[in-house]
Image (cartoon, rainbow, N blue to C red):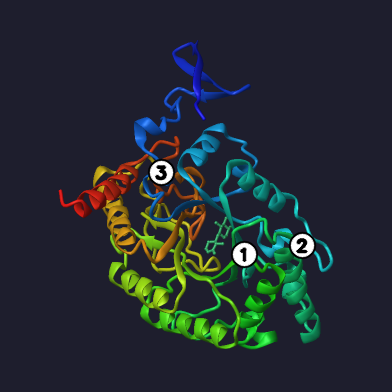
Amino acid sequence: MKLFLHTKIILGLSAIFVVQLGNQKIVLPEGCSTQTKSVAQTGSLKESFKDDFLIGTALNADQIQENDPRAAALIQQQFNAITPENIMKAEIIHPGWDKYDFDMADKIVAYGKKYNIKVNGHTLIWHSQLPAYARNIKSIDSFKTFFAGHINTVAGRYSGKIFSWDVVNEALNEDGTMRKSIFLEHLGDNFVTEAFRLAAAASPHTELYYNDYNNEQPAKRAGCIVLIKKIKAAGVRIDGVGIQGHWHIGKIPLKEIEESILQYSALGLKVMFTELDIEVLPRNFSGADVNQRMKEDASLNPYVKGLPDSVQQQLANDYAALFDLFLKHKDKITRITFWGVDDGQSWLNGWPVRGRTNHPLLFDRNFQPKPAFYKVVEAKKNFDATKKGF
Ligand code: XIL
């Protein structure tokens, strides 16, 4: 899809641009980019890596509804897999005991169909973003009814319509033991296996994954492997493991990531990086526990006016190193999904500190590719050149 500059209007000393997209017009202030660069100008992630793995992005409700044509154009140019950032989580899709709201979930399925993009459902069982009634269920029988009903209904509805599900999200502590969640409390540690059993029955042709953050770290990885082996020992299907990949600039755990790719794939599982972003702002903890927060403080928000060159370069180098590693193990990796399209809508502007200006992705706030984007595309060219012996 192309954006065409329609009119430049001079208003006193400043100017605005009116941009035409199909039969829609959007107004951009001067200084905002007026064109989504063409693939010929920039390259495309999904094209570059088409023989290697899928390239995905998380989509929020606005993006699913194509409210901003610049985001819409970029998504179609660059990505061939999508994960709903929030709209398939229990609090949205199952807001009352016997009330489901499939409106937005149906829309993302239609979006995937329209543009031939694979949809990964996110997520069936997670302790966060649960509706209040579910958190307050006291009886074990009622909780079992909620658990099975939720999986049967949601996974059943999208059976044959989406490519995959993150069946269980974040069931582990950092030391590899089971997280003390409402699921563990009411159902015991077999709840993970049971979730996969129910999902496989409700959606027999959908790939089923376990997803977590920091599960590339040795202790948590060991716990994750125990979980996977338990599911398999019960004769229940699990197809892959997702490493979320919410990392921090200058601290990408490349060695542990490589070890994890090898160990997970040795279990016969597909490996995915499911929520990739690289935090550039100060943070006093690692991982992505959405319930962990830090107090607002101006010193924690140093790049409101943009990234200094040195940080931009470090970000680019970190992304390039990651993609070098992903390419090295492309036979074991099936998908790399970024947690967002552009820096402006990344969740890291609001977490773990509210109101920051973060820069964790490959596209900036004007939907333009950053140096990190070009380095990632270059990583693929270098990889191919080395293979050909140049
Ligand atoms: C985040 C979303 O991006 C935010 O919009 C929301 O407020 C909280 O959840 N791990 C996950 C994702 O599995 O679902 C989380 O998404 C980020 C951490």
Horizontal and vertical percent position of residue 41: 35, 30
- Whether residue 23 is visible, yes or no, is yes
Q: Is 232 above or below relative to 253?
A: below
The secondary structure type at the circle numbered 2 is loop
Q: Which residue is mark 3?
A: 47
List the single residue furthest toward the right.
98
List the single residue furthest toward the front.
388
Q: Residue at x 76, y 66 (%)?
A: 153
Q: Is 251 above or below relative to 17?
A: below
Q: Amino acid at mark 3?
A: Glu
Viewer-proximal residue, 320 or 182? 320
- Whether residue 311 is visible, yes or no, is no
Q: Which residue is mark 2?
A: 95
The secondary structure type at the circle numbered 1 is loop
Mark positioned earlier in the residue sequence (3 or 1): 3
Which of the 4 image quarters holds residue 189? bottom right
Q: Which residue is mark 1?
A: 206
Q: Residue at x 84, y 66 (%)?
A: 98
Query: For the residue with label 3, is its CB less than 8 Å from the closest atom of ligand 1?
Result: no
